[in-house]
Image (cartoon, rainbow, N blue to C red):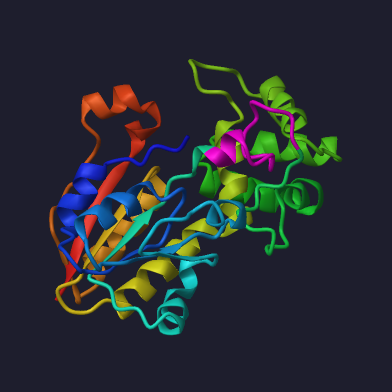
Amino acid sequence: MHIPVLTKEVLEYLSPKPNENFIDCTLGFGGHAEEILKRTKPNGKVLGIEIDPEIAKKNKQERLIVVNDSYVNLRKIVKVNDFKANGILFDLGLSSFHFEGSNRGFSFQKDEFLDMRFSPKSRLMAYDIINSWPEKDIEEILKEYGEERHSRRIAKAITEARKIKTTKELACLIEKIVPRRGKIHPATRTFQALRIAVNDELENIRKGLLEATEVLGVGGRIVVISFHSLEDRIVKHFFKDNPNLKVLFKKPIQPQEDEILNNPRSRSAKLRAVVKI
């Protein structure tokens, strides 16, 4: 089960009130949306956008409008649904479903085909990158998206070992050439990099934030939860450099100790918020 993170803080900075409308750009299983809907009774609505069709179809709540699409298309989605929002939320974390139940190769804990797509509409899979991209290109995404200091060695081993079909094959290959230190598996950064590349995650964040700024009225708020430094850096600079946005606090808010104990995956979460001026 996916537990929404920083829910108290999301509600504090989105500040939902009765009959107001909000957009959840990363609906997931609707945890944040459910709490927002409680505070916008009786007539407030949430427009929930979810790129994964398997997750999207599981959401059925009163006053929740579910759209199976990407938040990079936010302006079009808002127009089609004739929706005006008082605030917009982005929770950039992966759902537990992707790691545990999707069978798409997001985790090396199970032996699955190297897919890693959030949506079947996408053409590029991790398998394609691993088995057809040039060594230099693989090295670059491992270095840029995974911040992997062994990127050159891993890229060389991958291109020499082709073909690699499953998560276990890839994880075992990396484990043979990169020393394991501490609890973190040596394949962790490679898997992160491949997932980001397959789904164009970083560029999509930039596009989504731009679209959110354009559809939101003056006084509306944007709240973003990120989970690693690459995401947070994009959000931080986008908010700081946009003259139409007022940053509500300089340093990102992180989970309290009790939340981390109840939900260990929340430990890396960072929340930033702005108001449109």
- The residue at the far right in this view is 163
Q: Is residue 162 left or right of residue 38?
A: right
**Residue in front for this viewpoint, 111 or 182:** 111
* Residue extent of the magenta highlight: 97-112
Q: Residue at (85%, 40%) from the top-left corner?
A: 162
Quarter occupied by residue 122: bottom right
* 61 drawn magenta: no
Q: Position of residue 87 (x, y in %)?
A: 25, 66
Residue 79 at x, y = what percent? 42, 84
Q: 151 and 54: which one is in front?
A: 54
Residue, x 61% and y 50% (percent of image)? 140
Answer with left or right where residue 198 lies relative to residue 240: right
Q: Is residue 277 above or below residue 254?
A: below
Image coordinates for residue 226, horizontal then vertical, percent? 36, 48
- Image quarter of the C terminus: bottom left
Q: For the stretch drawn in magenta, what is the main secondary structure?
A: loop
Residue in view at x 55 percent, y 40 percent:
97
Of the pair 135 and 215, the residue shown nearer to us: 215
Please give left or right for residue 239 compared with residue 92 in the image.
left
Instruction: Please determine whether, in this image, residue 228 is positioned above or below residue 72.
Output: above
Q: Is residue 102 magenta?
A: yes
